[in-house]
Image: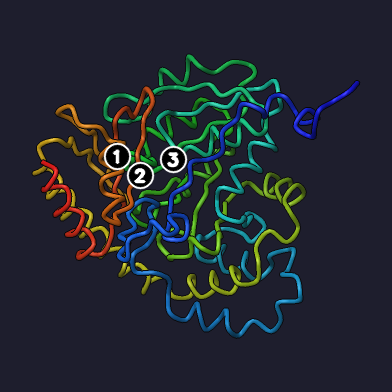
Amino acid sequence: MERDGLIDWTRPEFLKLKGYSACKNAEALGDAAPKRIVKLDANENPYGSYPDCYDAIDKIPSLAIYPDAAQTSLKHLAAAHCGCEDDQIVFGAGSSQLIEYLIRLFVDRDEELINLVPSFAMYQFFSNTNCNKVVNVPRDQNFEIDIDGIRKAITPKTKLMFIANPNNPTGNVTQIPLIEEALDLGIPTVVDEAYYEFTGVTALPLMKKYPNLMVLRSFSKFAGLAGLRVGYGIFPKDIADRLHAIRDPYNINVAAVAAAKVAIAHYDELMVNVKKICVERDRLLNMLQEINYLHVYPSQSNYIMCKVLNGKSATYLQTILEEQGILTRCFGGVWLENCIRFSIGLPEEDDILMDALKKLA
């Protein structure tokens, strides 16, 4: 069979896939980047990482030696922090990598994953690359999960469900009794707590009662380590074993290991910055409510979702702000039509955002 090029040899189910819509930075903007960048598009920590993280990275004995494939010391520290056993912990290059591993582990090509939309785009993304069927169960008008809708969506092919808590990108928290109702349905369920530190609401204690529960956490947000890509999950021991069996053997690099250890050791100090972000979130939320072309959704995380009203376009708003060096995240589709999200920045950065928004009123 004659073929014109390598693209003709690729798997046909991947030909129509679009890549993840990643956020921008000054490097991505290139020569068009303004001198001043206010980066409010990726839910990053505006206070950065703990200073000792840099010292720990500088003191790495050798970059020529692979990290510990068993993640021994890092698992021990995380387990002590979470109050679980070492062999329940699995680290990934960001919790996103663990999402991919979990989909690969539980969901075969002809099986189904339940996605409670709108929610974190990576659930759909990795389902696409794993060639699974995604069953979208819409949240209600307040972005709360719909237990009856989930129940009706479950079939013999249902193998996994994700609940982002707080939900990304909407910022709302699903309270524990409702998560228990979801767990009572019996399917393997991942509660994605990437933003847990901003709420203090966690499903982790429920693991003693529910063998179908798995919990994900991240160092990207509270610890300011997004650039190093380090996250972890707490799992039943037999599931942790299977995840270790299918993960890349050296998936956490030595710099990420060194910085994550420091972050765990200085958790209380990092939480001081988390509290500052929460105070600033509430201040920004109050100011955004004064903008007459925005409907502001309540948030308990480090970002605020808004629906753009009065005939204005979220995409146009994003473009105008970007021209001024203010980076934001735009959303669309059935569940988030004409929406824009603002990460919480430093107070002076949020003031710059507000000045720009007021001028567009």
**Regarding mark 1 in the picture, which secondary structure is present there?**
strand
Residue assigned mark 1: 340
Q: How many neighbours does mark 2 have within 10 angstroms: few (below 14), some (14-19), or many (20 or more)?
A: many
Specify the amino acid type for callout 1: Ile
In the rendered structure, find residue 329 and report the number of the disc placed on it: 2
Q: Position of residue 96 (x, y in %)?
A: 56, 47
Whether residue 89 is visible here, answered yes or no, is: no
Q: Quadrant of the N terminus?
A: top right
Q: Position of residue 356 (x, y in %)?
A: 17, 51
Which residue occupies 48% across, 14% down?
A: 152
In the rendered structure, find residue 284 and report the number of the disc placed on it: none
Residue 105 image-quadrant placement: top right
Which residue occupies 48% across, 37% down?
A: 121
Q: How many neighbours does mark 3 have within 10 angstroms: few (below 14), some (14-19), or many (20 or more)?
A: many
Specify the amino acid type for callout 2: Arg
Q: Position of residue 324 (x, y in %)?
A: 26, 55
The answer to whether the residues at label 2 and label 1 have Cβ atoms under 8 Å apart is: yes
140 on left or right of 246: left
In the rendered structure, find residue 164 and report the number of the disc placed on it: 3
Which residue occupies 48% across, 46% down?
A: 22
Earlier residue among tags 2 and 3: 3
Viewer-proximal residue among 169 and 351 = 351
Q: How many neighbours does mark 1 have within 10 angstroms: few (below 14), some (14-19), or many (20 or more)?
A: many
185 on left or right of 299: right
Whether residue 57 is visible here, answered yes or no, is: yes
Viewer-proximal residue among 171 and 304 = 304
Q: Position of residue 132 (x, y in %)?
A: 64, 26
Earlier residue among tags 2 and 1: 2
Q: Does residue 331 lie above or below 270 as drawn?
A: above
